[in-house]
Image (spheres, helix red, strand yellow):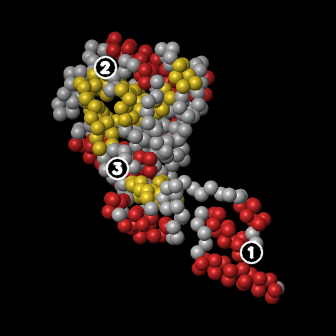
Amino acid sequence: MKLLHTSDWHLGRSFHGTGLLDAQAQVLDVLLDTVREHRVDAVLLAGDVYDRALPPADAVRLLDRALRQIRAAGAEVVLTSGNHDSAVRLGFGGGLMEAAGVHVRADAADLARPVLLRQRHDDGARGEGEPGQTVAVYGVPFLEPRHQGQAWEVEPNHTAVMTEAVRRIREDLEARRAESASPVAGVVMAHLFAAGGHGSESERDIGEGEHVEHPGGTPEALVGTLGQVPVSVFAGLDYVALGHLHGRQRLADHVRYSGSPLPYSFSEANHRKGAWLVTVEGGAVRAVEAVDWEAGRRLAVIAGPLDALLGSAEFAHAEDRWVQATVTDDERPERALERLKTRFPHVLVFRHEPAGGRRTRERTYADALRQAPSDLALTTGFVDHVRERAASPAEAALLQDALEASRLAEVRA
């Protein structure tokens, strides 16, 4: 039996003001090709289906199309809600969709009620494991620690809440294994920040800066404000399909992030986007393979003096990509962004960061304002203060003309 682990579709997201729906449609077409090529039995979508709780209509239509196509290709779908989703809205109609092979887990009350994927006897090409094996997929929606901790009477932090969730799952899984004459593999889907994972700039903070106790008693300090769950919480499970972090990564053989199918920040420029293809045979995970996807415009992060960015072959790869450009000249070059766009028409982020560091100001602008010897010195000083480059002679002349025109207008009034 083959499972495709994906997450963080963020349908409806924009990238620095640029809509990504077309690129998202492209990558979902590539996902569908993967389902067909590898004869995938189930697609696991571990949260952040949409980018916000109230997704735009086009994003809803895209999800509807994707789910119909995946089902038509022969794969079931299990999806959970992430911290960007509205669990109630995503879960609407879940009972009806389940009958059609789309299983939504958006309610914590259902996390110990698995989706049971059974080995197909009528199609030997779909999995070559032991006859009758079952994969029990437990979908854990994003759990808000304050609310869920109170409901379950555990500490209101991510580790305590997830530990309790997994305890309930293990209890159900062990009972099913005891009652079944055939192998049962336990797969958990969850949306969280796991300790040891590497984040990027595009993930929303889901933590409270907690300090928690590792289940084995070892204290673990959390980094920044992201509540992190120790990987040891998932011990004994066959596979854990995580969502939330946008880089595909392995935390343990059985605990992995698929990452987002598209880059959603320039910190992901070097990510290999795709999914994990998980093969289950005889009630155990036998292989986990990376599947790479290419869709949408790629990203490039470039930096250097403006003349080098415009003339060097080193940066030719960025000419057709979305670009974050950092100009390192000591002074901000004139018309820097406009000139960059002649070579890199898809610049989305422009920065000026002098290689030698920014100038140390000898006095504040308020001091300069009080000490300006003339109106022209005041205006040219403002230009210098804001853009960190002195006004050129032509600019100074233009400002002088404007000041003269203003004085003349006052006299006429």
Residue on which disc 1 sits: 375
**Residue 28 locus on image (x, y percent):** 34, 48
Above/below status of 381 relative to 66 = below
Q: Where's the C terminus, which quadrant? A: bottom right
Residue on which disc 3 sits: 27
Q: Earlier in the sequence, mark 3 or mark 1?
A: 3
Inter-mark Cα distance, 1 to 2:
82 Å
State the count of labels.
3
Q: As drawn, is 316 to the left or to the right of 83?
A: left
Q: As drawn, is 197 to the left or to the right of 374?
A: left
Kindly give the residue lying farthest to the left in the view shown: 124
Above/below status of 217 relative to 356 = above
Q: Residue at x 78, y 65 (%)?
A: 370
Query: Helix or strand or loop: what does disc 1 sit on?
Result: helix
In the rendered structure, find residue 184 and report the number of the disc placed on it: 2
- Residue 19 visible within the image: no
Task: Give, as a three-letter code, the residue at label 1.
Answer: Asp
Q: Where's the N terminus, which quadrant? A: top left
Q: Earlier in the sequence, mark 2 or mark 3?
A: 3
Above/below status of 332 relative to 236 = below
**Residue 158 locus on image (x, y percent):** 53, 27
Above/below status of 73 relative to 250 = below
